[in-house]
Image (spheres, rainbow, N blue to C red):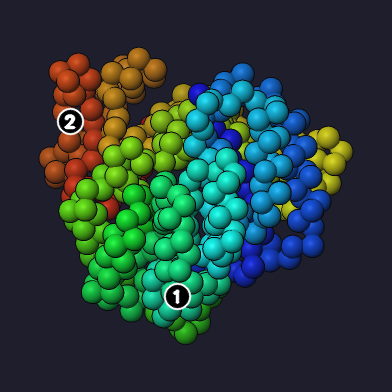
């Protein structure tokens, strides 16, 4: 099984914290759309005839596409790949694009999962982030979307300066009240060359606080658990049967094809990524060239990626799989270097069904998982 990710590199305006590849100019949208179609056709042999079980429209802002444009891309995937009977097809969407009419039209397409970029239900936070929608639009769009889609996830950001614990709890409660079955929630981070980084450097906006983010993270974990959500990945919380199949495939090392500028792909042995430039991407595809860079992964690369992704999920790291796929040296390295974290109650080793020994992250260690993982890497 495999997945296809389609990157739509356009936004109405730039969020202050975002460092993803996008353009606020839509004048080349038509050209780029045709190139997305062509890239799908050019790469139809790359997934070793694996069946496609997920299609994910990310960005940027995929909800800027018309229904006709979305259907064209989905139909192109179906024409060039074998697709399973009931694939998960996700559209990332901003509330201001989800009018009642648009939601009704989307519900008639093959798209069966919406990922709505709420970020916050409070205008103060949205203004700070330079989001294009208001809190009122967020609630109106979500109210209508939940009438037509059962499988909805929303994004929420925590660790925002001036975001009190109480207002963060209210954000979560509003999400619960709408009955969403999945929440993706991330700490606000300061990425280089973003507007947020500039504001902080200039002293016009307070820096983010790790202590505040940790408090919000604990509230997030506690409150979602009380509502029946499972934290199946550090930043992802889903009710049973509502985990993201597409994102889970990344964490479990399945094959995926990335279409569009800046999109990444993985075929089991190597990674590739397209150029992060719309004009250069268009020119290359128009000449039947793939504007991508390839990297063949070594055993050390694969091991380190497995450590990073495995520790972030509820499935953890299978010690038997490490020995089977990488050898005893890698397993012994992992056990030796994880000892101090086990002793500090940040990691645990357990037997699952008395057959599969797992190295996993404790509740205490979840907020520190990226740093822990880097200490376990093979260099």
Q: Residues within 10 Å of mark 2 (few under 14, many from 20)?
A: some
Per the image, the residue denoted by label 1 is: 136
Q: Position of residue 124 (x, y in %)?
A: 41, 80
Per the image, the residue denoted by label 2 is: 349
Answer yes or no: is residue 104 visible.
Answer: yes
Q: Which of the two residues, 9 or 242, is positioned nearer the viewer here?
A: 242
Query: CA gap, disc 2 to disc 1?
Result: 46 Å
Residue at x-position 46% and y-position 57%: 145
Q: Quadrant of the C terminus?
A: top left
Residue 73 placement, left or right of 143? right
Residue at x-position 17% and y-position 53%: 226
Q: Which of the two residues, 323 or 186, is positioned nearer the viewer here?
A: 186
Q: Which of the two residues, 120 or 47, is positioned nearer the viewer here?
A: 120
**Can you say whether 19 is above or below 203 in the image?**
above
Answer yes or no: is residue 211 visible.
Answer: no
Q: Residues within 10 Å of mark 1 (few under 14, many from 20)?
A: some
SS for dot 2 = strand
**Can you say whether 9 is above or below 294 in the image?**
below
């Amino acid at each position: 099984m495999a997945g296809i990710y389609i990157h739509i590199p356009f936004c109405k305006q730039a969020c202050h914290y975002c460092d993803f590849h996008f353009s606020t100019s839509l004048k080349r949208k038509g050209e780029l759309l045709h190139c997305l179609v062509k890239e799908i056709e050019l790469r139809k042999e790359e997934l070793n005839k694996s069946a496609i079980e997920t299609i994910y429209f990310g960005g940027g802002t995929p909800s800027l596409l018309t229904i006709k444009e979305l259907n064209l891309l989905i139909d192109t995937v179906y024409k060039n790949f074998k697709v399973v009977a009931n694939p998960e097809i996700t559209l990332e969407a901003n509330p201001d694009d989800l009018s009642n009419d648009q939601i009704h039209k989307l519900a008639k397409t093959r798209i069966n999962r919406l990922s709505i970029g709420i970020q916050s239900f409070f205008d103060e936070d949205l203004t700070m982030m330079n989001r294009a929608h208001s809190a009122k639009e967020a609630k109106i769009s979500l109210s209508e979307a939940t009438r037509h889609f059962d499988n909805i996830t929303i994004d929420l950001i925590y660790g925002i300066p001036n975001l009190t614990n109480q207002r963060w709890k209210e954000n979560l409660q509003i999400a619960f009240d709408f009955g969403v079955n999945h929440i993706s929630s991330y700490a606000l981070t300061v990425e280089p060359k973003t507007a947020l980084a500039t504001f902080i450097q200039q002293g016009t906006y307070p820096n983010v606080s790790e202590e505040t983010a940790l408090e919000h993270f604990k509230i997030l974990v506690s409150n979602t658990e009380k509502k029946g959500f499972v934290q199946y990945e550090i930043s992802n919380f889903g009710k049973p049967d509502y985990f993201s199949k597409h994102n889970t495939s990344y964490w479990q090392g399945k094959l995926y094809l990335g279409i569009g500028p800046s999109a990444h792909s993985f075929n089991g042995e190597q990674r590739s990524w397209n150029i992060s430039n719309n004009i250069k991407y268009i020119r290359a595809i128009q000449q039947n060239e793939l504007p991508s860079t390839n990297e063949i992964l070594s055993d050390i690369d694969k091991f380190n990626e497995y450590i990073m992704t495995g520790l972030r999920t509820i499935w953890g790291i299978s010690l038997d799989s490490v020995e089977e796929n990488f050898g005893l040296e890698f397993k012994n390295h992992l056990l030796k270097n994880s000892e101090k974290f086990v002793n500090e109650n940040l990691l645990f080793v357990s037997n699952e069904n008395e057959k599969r020994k797992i190295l996993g992250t404790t509740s205490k260690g979840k907020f520190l998982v990226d740093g822990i993982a880097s200490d376990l890497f093979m260099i």
